[in-house]
Image (tube, rainbow, N blue to C red):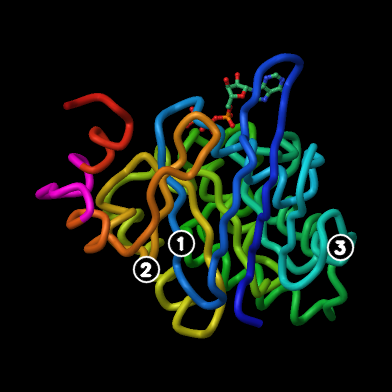
Amino acid sequence: MKFAVELTNSSKKFKQTIVINELSLQVRTGILFALIGPSGGGKTTLIKMIMGMLKSDTGTVTALNKKVPNKQLLHDIGYMAQADALYTDLTGQENLEFFGKMYAMSKKELQDRITYASNIVDLADHLSKKVEDYSGGMKRRLSLAIALIQDPPLLILDEPTVGIDPLLKLKIWQELTQLKNQGKTIFVTTHAMDEAEKCDEIAMLREGSIIATGTPFDLKQQFNAADLDEVFLQAGGETQ
Ligand SMILES: Nc1ncnc2c1ncn2[C@@H]1O[C@H](COP(=O)(O)OP(=O)(O)OP(=O)(O)O)[C@@H](O)[C@H]1O
């Protein structure tokens, strides 16, 4: 499969406002891909269209060779939303079990996956705590662990490291890179240019259109910029 995600002339309008404007995008299989762009530019909307949570008004959206929406994709995509969707009156362990039970796994497999995912986000020692007693960062980490639980071939993560401290952030990115090296495709949105720098390809979304794509190196060349922050500012129209 050449592309893990493909959008062709896809659009989304809310009432009179066009949020995604006849957008086409191809994300190659097996890469770390970052979608960046100004706040309100449409990143979350685009992710929801890929997930099939929002229907594209025009064109087509394909993920893992399946036309969206498709039930199987809910199994094959590990999705982390921007807003945490957790059961706060349950413990971390119970949340992971709840989401993990949606996938065909033996008890042992599920527990192994819980151990793996909670270690990656450094929550193994907090699994017996109720989520209502978690900090904001711990909730983000639990959401990420849930996205990893079924070992999906495609991860779609909407700002996965917001509110997470630098050391753990580094560890999470090392793990994402490792997952990519295992052949998985990882699609993230981020406002952090040091994170975008770690990605194989970046697409910049502004006012519903992709205004630039390429490797971090390509983008810096394209915009004659010293770093990605500068690319971001120029592409966002913030500087001349
Ligand atoms: N359900 C909705 N109804 C109406 N407008 C919406 C809806 N969802 C999003 N929008 C609008 O679409 C635009 C894009 O929002 P979106 O959340 O996709 O941006 P974003 O790039 O993810 O922003 P951020 O970086 O701040 O998370 C915004 O102007 C937002 O107000």
**Residue range corresponding to the magenta coloring:** 222-230
Name the residue at 46% across, 61% down.
33
x, y (%) of residue 31?
47, 73
Please give the label number shown on residue 102: 3
Q: Nearer the viewer, mark 3 or mark 2?
A: 2
Query: Callout 2, which amino acid?
Result: Asp
Task: Kindly indicate the quadrant of the structure image that contains residue 69.
Answer: bottom right
Earlier residue among tags 3 and 1: 1
How crowded pointer 3 is (Cα within 10 Å; few <14, some 14-19, many 20+) is rated as few
Vertical order, 117 against 190 (above or below): below
Q: Pointer 2: what residue? A: 200
Position of 72 with respect to 126 (left or right) is: right
Q: CA distance from mark 3 to mark 1?
A: 27 Å
Estimate the x, y position of residue 152 in percent, counting from the top left: 68, 71
Task: Estimate the spatial distance between the alpha carbons at disc 3 and disc 2, rounded to whole Å.
Answer: 31 Å
Nearer the observer: mark 3 or 1; the answer is 1
Q: Which residue is mark 1?
A: 33
Under mark 3, the amino acid is: Met
Q: In the image, what residue occupies the spot 48% across and 45% down? A: 210
User: What residue is at 55 percent from the left and 63 percent from the top?
Assistant: 118
